[in-house]
Amino acid sequence: MDEKYLIKNTTKEERIRIVDEALGNLEGSCDGCMRGVLSMYDPYIEGTMELYECNAAFRRGFVQEDADRSGLKGSSCAMD
């Protein structure tokens, strides 16, 4: 992780810009589909969770939901 993205090295405004640029700020053309993805970064923007922690938390939830749906034990995520 590049230290320039850590909470201690950024302002709230910079963190908003980092998230917007990483996801491609789609304000004008968004139909609401990105709302859930954007909200997962709220803790980073607010300074309570590092960016890598937000990503890890999302991934844990995604993998668990996938395993629950398929009845599998462990991960069926192709990213593992």
Image: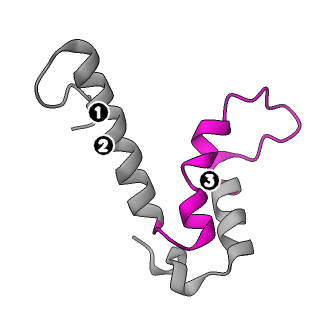
Q: CA distance from mark 2 to mark 3?
A: 21 Å
Q: CA distance from mark 1 to mark 2?
A: 5 Å
Q: Is residue 75 above or below residue 48?
A: above
State the residue at coordinates (65%, 64%). 18
The residue wearing badge 2 is 60
Residues at discs 2 and 3 in contact (Cβ within 8 Å) = no
For label 3, count other residues whose C-alpha is less than 10 Å away and answer few (under 14), some (14-19) or many (20+). Answer: few
Relative to residue 37, is residue 21 depicted above or below?
A: below
Mark 2: amino acid: Arg
Say few, some or many: other residues with alpha carbon within 10 Å of mark 2 (under 14 / 14 to 19 / 20 or more).
Answer: few
Q: Please provide the residue range marked out in magenta.
A: 21-50
Assess whether residue 25 is covered by the magenta stretch: yes
Nearer the observer: mark 3 or 1; the answer is: 1
How has the structure been colored for display?
Answer: one colour
Residue at x 58% of width, y 41% of height: 37
Gap in Å between the C-alphas at discs 3 and 1?
22 Å
The mark found on residue 22 in the picture is: 3
Tell me if label 1 and label 2 are in contact, CB under 8 Å.
yes
Q: Is residue 50 above or below residue 69?
A: below
**Disc count in the image?**
3
Residue at which label 1 appears: 63
- In which quadrant of the rendered image does the C terminus lie? top left
Q: Nearer the viewer, mark 2 or mark 3?
A: 2
The image's mark for residue 33 is none
Quadrant (top left, top right, bottom left, bottom right) of the N terminus: bottom left
Q: Earlier in the sequence, mark 2 or mark 3?
A: 3
Looking at the image, the residue that sits furthest to the bottom is 8
